[in-house]
């Protein structure tokens, strides 16, 4: 049974996380200090150590919460598409990823931008890592579902760059997919590089030198990715 003290602690932890995120959105990650959070909440900075061991741990929890929010939105975008429509699912999740990133640029930068000093110092797997893995599983699960239902050509080991082979083997081992062809993982990474790279260039303003609206370029990227995977591209409604 949850006690009143437990409920109060949970509420305070939630408020700390929400306050940290609000500061992140309004001022950027460098402004998310224990002192700033405590000031917003009417607490002292040392009092926050009753809830988090360090500033890094607090930020890691904020990162985990953001990953969880993004993961839920991506899964929802997939569930909204009819079950057998693999093309629709891929296009939907890719577009939702871009949409979320553009509407949450500060959060996106925390997850996918330059590393925040001190944020990744602890090598131990924690809440943020678990949430990041759940995020990654959205794309990998969909990709594997497509390949198993409608196999598409993948490079043989002999066709893969020798410098990539040991890295792909290591990745396969870490992903727990011993039965997966290395060429399949190469194609998966190629698709991810293009998707996340395209979104990052737009979010961080690196296409503004040429484009006022990067949406057509993003759709062109999807048009190019779809056919090798056996998918049918359809324009957004």
Image: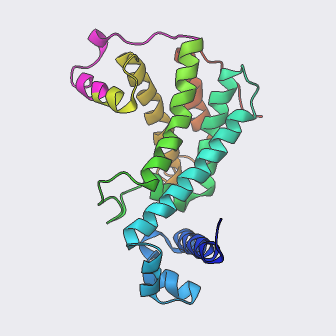
Reply above or below: 237 against 71: above
Residue 143 picture quarter: top right
Q: Nearer the viewer, residue 235 or 79?
A: 79
Q: Is residue 123 left or right of residue 179?
A: left
Residue 157 picture quarter: top left
Q: Confirm whether residue 198 shows in the render.
A: no
What is the total number of numbered labels drawn onto the structure image? 0
Reply above or below: 54 against 175: below
From the top left corner, tell me how far across and down residue 158 is, in percent: 27, 10
Is 166 inside the magenta-drawn segment?
yes
Q: Nearer the viewer, residue 163 or 135?
A: 135
Task: Give the main secondary structure of the magenta stretch.
Answer: loop
Residue 164 picture quarter: top left
Q: Nearer the viewer, residue 162 or 53?
A: 53
Reply above or below: 4 against 133: below
> Which span is picked out in magenta?
150-169
Q: Is residue 177 left or right of residue 160?
A: right
Colour scheme: rainbow
Q: Quadrant of the N terminus?
A: bottom right
Q: Quadrant of the C terminus?
A: top right
> Most extreme residue toward the front, as rendered?
1
Residue name at image x 49 percent, y 39 percent = 136
From the top left corner, tell me how far across and down residue 59 is, in percent: 44, 66
Residue name at image x 45 percent, y 68 percent = 58
Is 148 inside the magenta-drawn segment?
no
Q: Confirm whether residue 174 shows in the render.
A: yes
From the top left corner, tell me how far across and down residue 26 is, in percent: 56, 73
Q: Is residue 118 left or right of residue 138?
A: left
Residue name at image x 43 percent, y 35 percent = 193
Residue name at image x 30 percent, y 59 percent = 122
From the top left corner, tell me how far across and down residue 114 is, in percent: 37, 57
């Amino acid at each position: 049974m949850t006690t009143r003290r437990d409920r109060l602690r949970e509420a305070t932890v939630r408020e700390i996380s929400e306050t940290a995120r609000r500061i992140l959105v309004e001022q950027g990650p460098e402004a998310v200090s224990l002192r700033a959070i405590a000031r917003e909440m009417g607490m002292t900075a040392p009092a926050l150590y009753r809830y988090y061991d360090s500033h890094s741990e607090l930020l890691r929890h904020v990162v985990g919460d953001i990953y969880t929010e993004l993961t839920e939105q991506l899964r929802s975008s997939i569930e909204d598409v009819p079950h057998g429509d693999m093309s629709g699912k891929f296009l939907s999740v890719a577009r939702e990823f871009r949409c979320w990133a553009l509407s949450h640029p500060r959060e996106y930068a925390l997850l996918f931008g330059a590393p925040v000093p001190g944020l990744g110092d602890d090598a131990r797997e924690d809440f943020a890592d678990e949430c990041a893995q759940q995020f990654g599983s959205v794309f990998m699960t969909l990709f594997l579902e497509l390949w198993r239902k409608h196999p598409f050509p993948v490079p043989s080991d002999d066709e893969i760059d020798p410098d990539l082979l040991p890295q792909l083997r290591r990745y396969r081992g870490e992903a727990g997919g011993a039965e997966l062809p290395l060429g399949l993982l190469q194609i998966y990474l190629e698709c991810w590089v293009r998707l996340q790279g395209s979104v990052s260039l737009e979010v961080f303003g690196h296409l503004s030198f040429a484009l006022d609206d990067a949406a057509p370029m993003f759709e062109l990227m999807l048009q190019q990715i779809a056919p090798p995977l056996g998918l049918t591209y359809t324009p957004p409604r």
